[in-house]
Amino acid sequence: MVAKFDLNDDNVVVVIGTGAGGGVLSNELAQKGVKVVALEAGGRYLPEDYVNDEWESFGQLAWTDPRTTSGDWRVSRDFSGLPAWIVKAVGGATTHWAGASLRFQEHEFKTQTHYGNVEGASLLDWPITLADLAPYYDKAEKKLGVTRTNGIPGLPGNNNFKVFEAGAKKLGYKEVHTGRMAINPVDHDDRMACQQTGFCFQGCKWGAKWSAAYTDIPRGEATGNLEVREHAHVARILHNDQGKVTGVEYFDKDGALQMQKARVVCVAGNSLESPRMLLNSATSMFPDGLANSSGMVGKNYMRHLTGSVYASVDKPVRMWRGTTMAGIIQDEARHDPSRGFVGGYELETLGLGVPFMAAFLDPGAWGRSFTSAMDSYENMAGMWIVGEDMPQESNCVTLNDAVKDKWGMPVANVHFTDHPNDIAMRNHAYKQGKAVYEAVGATRTFPTPPYPSTHNLGTNRMSAKAQDGVVNKWGQTHDIDNLFISDGSQFTTGAAENPTLTIVSLAIRQADRIASEMTRKAL
C-alpha cells in the first residue's frame, strides 16, 4: 500500500531525492516503521519505458535544467551548460550508471595521513574508517547483488573485455576481471539475468542492473510508510526560531508552491543540487545558507579524474555489444608516489554507441582525422579512467544569481580546475591505457578528454571538526541536528573507486542512526 501523508504531518522524515542515497535511505527508514515523504524532481520511468537510443534516452532521463560553468576544465568549454550528466527521475543516477560496485581501500579514508600535505589540495581524513563501514558494505553488496561477492559469479566478458584483458596481461597486470557489478549474471532478487544487450547507461531494459527505481522504492512503498512525490522540485528548506528545520517548500507538477512539514530532512539531490538547496535556503538566521557556519557548503567539489582511451584493432570488436563496463584493471588503484602522483586510478571497459562516440571522441572536432576514426568504429575497443582527484576549496558549487531556473531560483554554477596531481595521474593513465591496446597490436589509439561529470562528490563534506566541513560521521549537519546530507556530497575525499556502493552503504548506516535517534526522541 502506497502511503499518502498530510502536508501538515510534522512527524515525517522528508528525503529530497530518490537515487543511491535518497532512494535507499527512504526504503531503509520505511522498513523500520518510519514515515517518509520522498520528493523527486523528475518523473517515474521503469524498464518498459527505457529506450536503447542514447540521445532519446538522454532527453527522457537527464537533468537538463540550466546550469553554468567556470574554471579551466575542458567541460566548461565543450559542454558549458552541462557540467554533469545526472538523472532527473525516480531512482536518480541508479538508472544511469554502469553498475560498478567497489569498496574504498583502507588508506583512502585517511588521505591526509597517507598522502601528507599536498600543495593546493584541501585533503582531510574522513571521520570514519573502512572498519566502521565494512558491515554496511556487506549489507550493500547483498542488497545490490554485487558479482564476486556472496557466492554470485562474475559476468561474462564481451569482446571489448577480451581485448582489454589480453593487453593487460601482456603488460603484466594481475588484477584484471569483469568487475564487481550490481548486474545479475544469473536470476537474482526477483530480477532476471543480464541479456548482454548493452546500452547500460540508458536504463536496463531487463531490470538485471540494480536500480532504486524498481527495487528499493517500490519495496519501501509496499510497507505503507513511504510516499514518493514525483515532479516535486524543491525550492528551499525551512526552519524555526530555534534553528531546527521544520519543513520543505517545493513546486509541484503544476508549478504550485507546496510546503511539507517535517521532523527530519535528508538532502540527497546530488553534489550539485544539494549545496544549491542549502544556499537557496538562506535566511537572516543563516545568511550564508543552511549548515554553512564553516563556509564549506559547495566547496571541495570533486568529479573523479576521468578520461578515456579508445583504440582501433585489426578485427571487429563491436564494443557496444554486451555489458558496458564489465571489465576492470585494479593494479593502478594503489597509492604509489613513485609514479609522480598520490592516490591511484582504475581502468574500466567502456563502450559507447555511435551518437555518443561522435559527441565525446574529440568534442568540436571535424576533418579527416576525426572521420577516419569514426570509420573504424566497428573495430574499436575502449576504456574509461576513474581516479582520485584532489579536493580543492576553490573547486565549488555556488549560486549564479544572474541565471534562474523556470521557478525563478538561482541556478548552480560549477567551478572546476584540475590540480597538478590530477593532470599527472591522467597522463599516466593515458600512457598505460594506450600501452594496453598497443600490446595487442592496436593500429591507432585515441586518448579522449573527460565527459560531463557522472561522479559528483564533495560540496558538503564529512569532517570530525565543524569548521572543516558540513556534516559529522553520520551525515548529520554540524549546525542543525535534524538536517542530514545523504548523497555523495558528504564524501570527504573521492578515492579511486566508483562511488555508488559507498553512497548506498552510508545510506544504510544513516538510516540505522536516524531511526535510533528518533526512537529515543533525540530527533
Image (cartoon, rainbow, N blue to C red):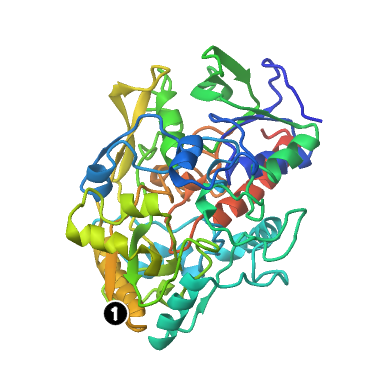
Q: Residue at x 39, y 54 (%)?
A: 354
Residue 393, percent across and down?
A: 30, 46
Q: Residue at x 58, y 30 (%)?
A: 43
With respect to residue 202, does 429 lie above or below? below
Q: Is disc 1 placed on a helix, strand or loop?
A: helix
Res 344 seen here: no
With respect to residue 156, does 264 lie above or below? above
Q: Single out the residue that lies furthest toward the left.
A: 367
Res 113 seen here: yes
Which of 52/13 is in front? 52
Residue 69, percent across and down?
A: 27, 38
Q: Which amino acid lies under the numbered mark 1 shown in the image of this protein?
A: Ser
Decide if residue 234 is on the left or right side of residue 168: right
Residue 273, percent across and down?
A: 44, 34
Residue 148, percent across and down?
A: 64, 71
Residue 177's image quarter?
A: bottom right
Residue 444's image quarter?
A: bottom left
Residue identified by numbered label 1:
338
Q: Residue at x 35, y 75 (%)?
A: 313
Which of 114/372 is in front? 372
